[in-house]
Image (cartoon, rainbow, N blue to C red):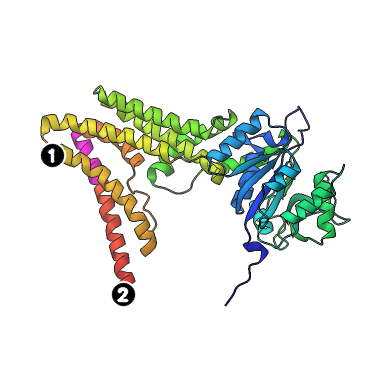
């Protein structure tokens, strides 16, 4: 059977307008600070989460804050281009792409953007015509436009040819109405205001509620005991000050790497207590970086390389300790030390296998590199370095065996 492609099957791109100034000062609305980043990064995140393959930012001038925001988006693997004119923006779209328009300063709930991206073009998001929505442009006597629309490249080209002295947003809205564009309600008709209302941000005062909602994303609500309990106590209080000072998440991640390698340097000088204290601190700072990444989702930078670099510092410390213990107690300590990272690698390798066979939730007590570095100081105090290393190896190995047994049982059940 041949299946004809609908509009919703065509690739999606986004056009974000960033030309208007704030109601105070001379900066762009797009560069208003929001949870350590900018408003346009939040808008880009909405488009990316809705399935946009790339983003075109329409802007006449590129201030430093906007250039930095674009750089951060690109580090987060987003494909972002800057267009200085409407004609330049049109040239950057593929003829088959659907274009998701986000007007200057316009934001809406992710669910609304997703619904808009899932319908046939042309379409727009509509709001009830009421005093609380007075900032939005009126469609008719009953509704106003929420600043989000969906159309084809051809539709945008036709609009550009008739612009003249008209405003882009107003002209697009008029043509959308003339084309009888589908209207997506900004609110769920059955549950009322179950979704946050769209907003037209003109100044910093409007961003408080949005920032509070973003910060609530920081707590992962899952993970092992180290992430859920220890890191929540240590890392969560850091999020607010870091965001308030607009510290980049990448800086936090690499600060954690630096702390961890300082611990490894102390271990090289046989100051293992310094390493035992600094490695958990580095893990907590890294957790703060991960939580900041959760705030921004797909627009956040990658954390893989900093994580590997930090774990390399912990592994280096383990090797240095094993060498010291083996000098006094024989080569068997090399075997004991090697089993701990081997068990952690085994746990990581088992996860895709378990997910494919029979998904099982991870136990909260499951070992991880961060869990081991947090456990190490307490064990060292109770039993010294030898017993600490033996206990950590036993902990990691026991977790691997338990997970392996679960995977084995799952495979047997599937065979039956």
Q: Position of residue 153 (x, y in %)?
A: 72, 54
Give the numbered dot on residue 322: none
Q: Is residue 390 magenta?
A: yes
The correct choice, above or below, for 386 with respect to 274 in the image is: below
- Side of 200 relative to 2 (left or right): right
Which of the marked residues, 2 or 1, is nearer the chain's N terminus? 1
Q: Residue at x 82, y 49 (%)?
A: 161
Viewer-side residue, 51 vs 131: 51
Helix, strand or loop for disc 2: loop
Tell me if residue 275 comes above or below residue 192 in the rendering: above
Work out which residue is located at the far right of the displayed protein and give it. 141
Is residue 66 shown left or right of residue 360?
A: right
Q: Nearer the viewer, residue 14 or 114?
A: 14
Crowd around label 2: few <14 · some 14–19 · many ≥20 (10 Å): few
Mark 1 highlights which residue? 332
Residue 226 percent across, percent down from the top left: 38, 42
Give the main secondary structure of the magenta stretch.
Answer: helix
Q: In terms of depth relative to the viewer, which is nearer, 15 or 146?
A: 15
Q: Residues within 10 Å of mark 1 (few under 14, many from 20)?
A: few
Q: Is residue 358 visible?
A: no
The local secondary structure at tag 1 comes to helix
- The image position of residue 82, as x and y in percent, is 66, 39
Which residue has dot 2 on it?
416
Q: Which residues are magenta?
A: 386-395
Q: Name the spot of residue 289 as percent of width and height, x first.
A: 48, 36
Please say whether residue 299 is one of the residues in the magenta stretch. Answer: no
* Residue under the image location 23 percent in, 33 percent down: 319
Structural distance between the alpha carbons of marks 2 and 1: 42 Å
Residue 104 showing in the rendered view = yes
Farthest top residue in view: 269
Residue 214 image-quadrant placement: top right
Q: How many marks?
A: 2
């Amino acid at each position: 059977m041949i299946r004809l492609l609908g509009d919703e099957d065509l690739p999606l791109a986004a056009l974000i307008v960033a030309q208007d100034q704030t109601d105070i000062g001379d900066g762009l609305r797009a560069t208003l600070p929001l949870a350590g980043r900018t408003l346009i990064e939040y808008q880009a995140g909405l488009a990316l989460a809705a399935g946009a393959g790339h983003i075109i930012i329409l802007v006449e001038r590129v201030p430093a804050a906007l250039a930095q925001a674009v750089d951060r988006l690109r580090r987060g693997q987003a494909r972002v281009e800057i267009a200085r004119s409407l004609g330049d923006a049109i040239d950057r779209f593929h003829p088959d792409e659907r274009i998701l328009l986000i007007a200057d300063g316009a934001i809406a709930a992710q669910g609304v953007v997703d619904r808009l991206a899932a319908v046939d073009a042309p379409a727009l998001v509509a709001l009830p015509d009421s005093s609380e929505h007075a900032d939005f442009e009126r469609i008719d006597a009953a509704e106003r436009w929420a600043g989000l629309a969906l159309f084809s490249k051809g539709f945008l080209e036709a609009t550009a040819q008739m612009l003249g002295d008209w405003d882009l947003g107003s002209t697009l809205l008029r043509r959308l109405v003339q084309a009888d564009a589908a209207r997506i309600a900004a609110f769920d008709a059955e549950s009322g205001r179950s979704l946050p209302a769209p907003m037209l941000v003109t100044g910093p005062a409007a961003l408080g509620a949005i920032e509070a909602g973003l910060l609530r994303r920081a707590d992962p609500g899952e993970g092992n005991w180290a992430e859920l309990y220890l890191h929540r106590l240590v890392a969560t209080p850091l999020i607010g000050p870091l965001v308030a000072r607009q510290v980049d998440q990448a800086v936090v991640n690499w600060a954690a790497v630096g702390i961890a390698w300082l611990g490894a340097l102390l271990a090289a000088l046989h100051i293992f207590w310094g390493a035992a204290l600094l490695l958990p601190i580095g893990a907590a700072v890294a957790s703060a970086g991960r939580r900041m990444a959760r705030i921004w989702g797909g627009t956040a930078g990658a954390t893989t390389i900093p994580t590997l670099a930090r774990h390399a510092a912990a592994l280096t410390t383990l090797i240095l300790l094993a060498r010291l213990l083996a000098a006094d107690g024989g080569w068997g300590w090399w075997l004991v030390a090697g089993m701990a990272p081997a068990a952690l690698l085994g746990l990581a390798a088992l996860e895709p296998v378990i997910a494919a066979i029979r998904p099982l939730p991870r136990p909260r007590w499951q070992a991880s590199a961060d869990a081991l570095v947090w456990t190490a100081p307490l064990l060292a105090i109770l039993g010294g370095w030898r017993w600490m290393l033996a206990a950590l190896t036993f902990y990691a190995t026991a977790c691997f065996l338990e997970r392996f047994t679960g995977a084995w049982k799952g495979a047997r059940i599937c065979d039956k």
